[in-house]
Image (cartoon, rainbow, N blue to C red):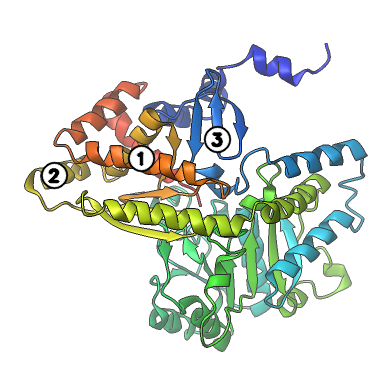
Amino acid sequence: MPFDLHSILQTNRGQGAALHAEHINPRFATVLKTIGYDHDYVRAEGPYLFDAAGNRYLDFLGGYAVCNFGRNHPTIKKALADYLALDLATMVQFEAPLLSGLLAKELKRRIGRGLDYVFFTNSGTEGVEAAIKFAKCATGKPALLHAPKAFHGLSSGSVSLNGCDSFRQGFAPFLPECRQVAFNDLAALERELARGDVAAFVIEPIQGKGVNIHAPGYLAEAARLCHRYGALFVADEVQTGIGRTGSFLALDQEDSAKGPVEPDMVILSKALSGGYVPVGAVLVKGDVWRKVFTSLDRAIVHSSTFHQGAMAMTAGLAALAAYDETNAAENARRMGAMIREGVEAMKPRFEMLKEVRQRGLMIGIEFGAPKSLLLRANWAATHAMDKNLFAQAVVVPLMEDHRILCQVAGHNQDVVKLIPPLVISEADVRDFLRAFETVMVNLHKPTATVGLLARLGKNAVFGGRRSVGEANDAAAGASSS
């Protein structure tokens, strides 16, 4: 019988959660059930998901910032169909592929900053691994610096730079000499660099966990300090890159009066895939590159079987075309500002609304302890039960009552994170703001905590406080950057 994808999907529709529980990850299947995220999506278009009943969901998660240009963008879809029709040679290995050369040239044109060469990867965490190796080889030094709450991936090297203990438990020992340096603190950074053993400072221009934004000029000065002490400055733009923050790179908004940010490496992934084929890129300064690939016998001293696959390179080139066609960065700036202004306008009415942090369509909404006695008691009780519980009181009803998909910003944080596709419209923003306002009204009622526990308990497969708490922890951890 010939392979028929349409028939396979039709025959097995609705069985995804059961198959996942039996064959892939039963714990995660329980998490999805508990927080009401166990939906069967059968179609996607732009910023929308659709289930088998025809219900439309507004996606403010964007596949963890993968789908910057919306799902199934016609330009990207056509490019991949064209690629398949051409029967091109790929994975020859002993060749210099045309498509990877073209994608590297295009990335360099858009990014500049003296970055001479491009190493392609299959993911963001692979890009971080490459940067770690390149930095150690180029400097001859052992130490790596990273920030608290940093997220650079979950492979063995990158998790050594992770600022969240929940991702590290059980996986020690980590790479030696990986040290945290206080967030946004140049004096602390200089003290660590002055020890003379630092190969690189690896940093997200905006932290994915919590959407924490550095003070103006910090990144430019941090790069200068790194170079003063013989260390490399590595910008992890896996989530912030390709329009997310309102410019092609987040670094593009961080140049200071004293000069531009001068990274030695920039790491990209996520949106470069176009939402279809995993792909990443590490752009590297020539002097760093030449210290790694020093001779003919070291021409492939760092490599990967799939890292220049023709379909992935096609997806990358088409994603850049879609970036231009959708005017993604400009729309991110306008829609992000509209969301921020809309939420900030609600702050006088809702005392638990603390702060909105926003750059383009990377938005963190933080909540804080209320002043009124009854609400303060509920706040304390909620946090005593589970430090991850409160933010679920926002994301769960947004999904269950309003069909809006978003996420908690990380473990033990009262922050909800919004990273929608960059193609959302003003109508989508108004829909979100109306839904968010309704959730805030209900959240400020005395019965809010009881209502959330009832929702989670109803959804939980096994029930009980322990399974609900574990699901909250997992859902917080799932907010991958």
**332 or 207, nearer to the observer:** 332
> Marks 3/1: CA distance?
17 Å
**448 or 306, nearer to the observer:** 448
Q: Which mark is residue 178?
A: none
Which quadrant of the figure contains the N terminus? top right
Asked which quadrant contains residue 436, the reply is top left
What's the residue type where badge 3 is placed? Answer: Tyr
> In the image, what residue occupies the spot 53% across and 71% down?
253
What's the residue type where badge 1 is placed? Answer: Arg
> In the image, what residue occupies the spot 21% across and 39% down?
385
Task: Find numbered disc 1 in the image and state the secondary structure of the residue it sits on.
Answer: helix
Q: Mark 1 points at which residue?
A: 434
The x and y percentages for residue 40 are 53, 23
Q: Name above or below for residue 264 compared with residue 277.
A: below
Q: Name the residue under label 3.
A: 48
Asked which quadrant contains residue 252, the reply is bottom right
- Of the residues tagged 3 and 2, which is closer to the observer? 3
Give the side of residue 427 with respect to residue 371, left or right.
Answer: right
Task: Find numbered disc 3 in the image and state the secondary structure of the residue it sits on.
Answer: strand
Q: Which mark is residue 375?
A: 2
What's the residue type where badge 2 is placed? Answer: Leu
First in sequence, mark 3 or 1: give its number. 3
> Marks 3/2: CA distance?
35 Å
- Asked whether the beta carbons under mark 3 and mark 2 sit within 8 Å of each other, the answer is no
First in sequence, mark 3 or 2: give its number. 3
Is residue 35 shown to the viewer in this render? no
Task: Find numbered disc 2 in the image and state the secondary structure of the residue it sits on.
Answer: helix
